[in-house]
Amino acid sequence: QQPFISSSPSSAVGQHSLGAMATSAATLDARTPADGVAQGDDEVEFEVSMLSGRRCTIRCPGAATLRELRVPIAASLRVEEEAEEEDSSAMAMLLCFAPLNAPAGADDDASIGTEGGAMLLAYETAAWQLAGRCISAVVVQLDTTWCSGKRLESSYIRGRRCGMQEEGKDTVLELQSNGEFTYSMHDHNHDHEPDSSYNHDQWVRARGHWTLEGEHGAEQSERVVLVGTATTTLDAVSVDREVCHGSEEEHESEGEREVDNANDVHTRTEGPFQLILTKIELMTPDPGWHSRGGWKSTDLA
């Protein structure tokens, strides 16, 4: 059974399929609920409301977690519309949840885990733990000053045998302040040997929209998510050299000659593009051309 969200009668929000979550009751991790609470694969209901008055009723498998439900809940509550009304950046919103009340007959909220002692529900909280409750959705604005409006560059090159062997990679990422991005990557390596050689070049050029995601209270968990379309070009040439002997029938003097057998690959493809880069790796200083990892950050003009 595919999990889904249905709106409450008082909400103008329609039903939203969770098909995009690519999860189902069979694939969600089962939890061991307390006595009298629905099992992990049973359907449960709870409500989510916002201070603005928007609310919806969630109906989903009991094993579904708030981490898995964040995106469809945000869509159901039209969180992005609310951010636009408040002139906030929708690309850097973090949706958190706080308990409002317990179901009838419950003594306390001991069955619910909180984040670092704060009255925010842990993202690992399962839906069965919220059955019959009402929780509040809280929008937290993430700080984007470290990545928004930045040009990030990463370069690496390593040569051996006076350039006969070489590998390198150049990446440029531009994160516009309006939520758009451009990305380009060039991966190159070649090797020239007496009996064989190859030359490999791959280019990826992508554009689309970026968002900043993270976890409450864990700044280093933040990550830039790139979603868009990309064009990938591949040029690869490999050559195997064979040593052939001359023959009198071919009116050639006896000796040796080289014959090159070349194999060329040239492709160009277009398709969807998605890449996730963590704040930790993007904030790691560039160690120089001859070491992998690290980025150089500059402001976009």
Image (tube, rainbow, N blue to C red):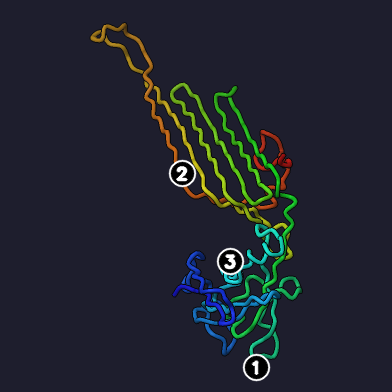
Query: Residue shown at 66%/52% (left/top)?
Result: 278
Query: Residue shown at 47%/47% (left/top)?
Result: 271
Determine the residue located farthest toward the bottom in the rendered image: 105
Mark 2 and mark 1: Cα distance apart in space? 57 Å
Return the residue at label 2: 270
At numbered mark 2, what does the secondary structure look like: helix, strand or loop?
strand
Can you tell which quarter of the image residue 107 is in? bottom right
* Horizontal and vertical percent position of residue 15: 51, 74
Figure check: 237 above or below 110: above
Give whichever of discs 2 and 1 has the lower sequence position: 1
Three-letter amino acid code of the residue under disc 3: Val
The answer to whether the residue labelled 2 contacts the one labelled 3, judged by CB atoms less than 8 Å apart, is no
The crowd level at tag 3 (other Cα within 10 Å; few <14, some 14-19, many 20+) is some
Give whichever of discs 1 and 3 has the lower sequence position: 3
Can you tell which quarter of the image residue 301 is in? top right
Return the residue at label 1: 105
Return the residue at label 3: 71
The crowd level at tag 1 (other Cα within 10 Å; few <14, some 14-19, many 20+) is few
Mark 1 and mark 3: Cα distance apart in space? 31 Å
Residue closer to the observer: 168 or 243: 168
Can you tell which quarter of the image residue 205 is in? top right
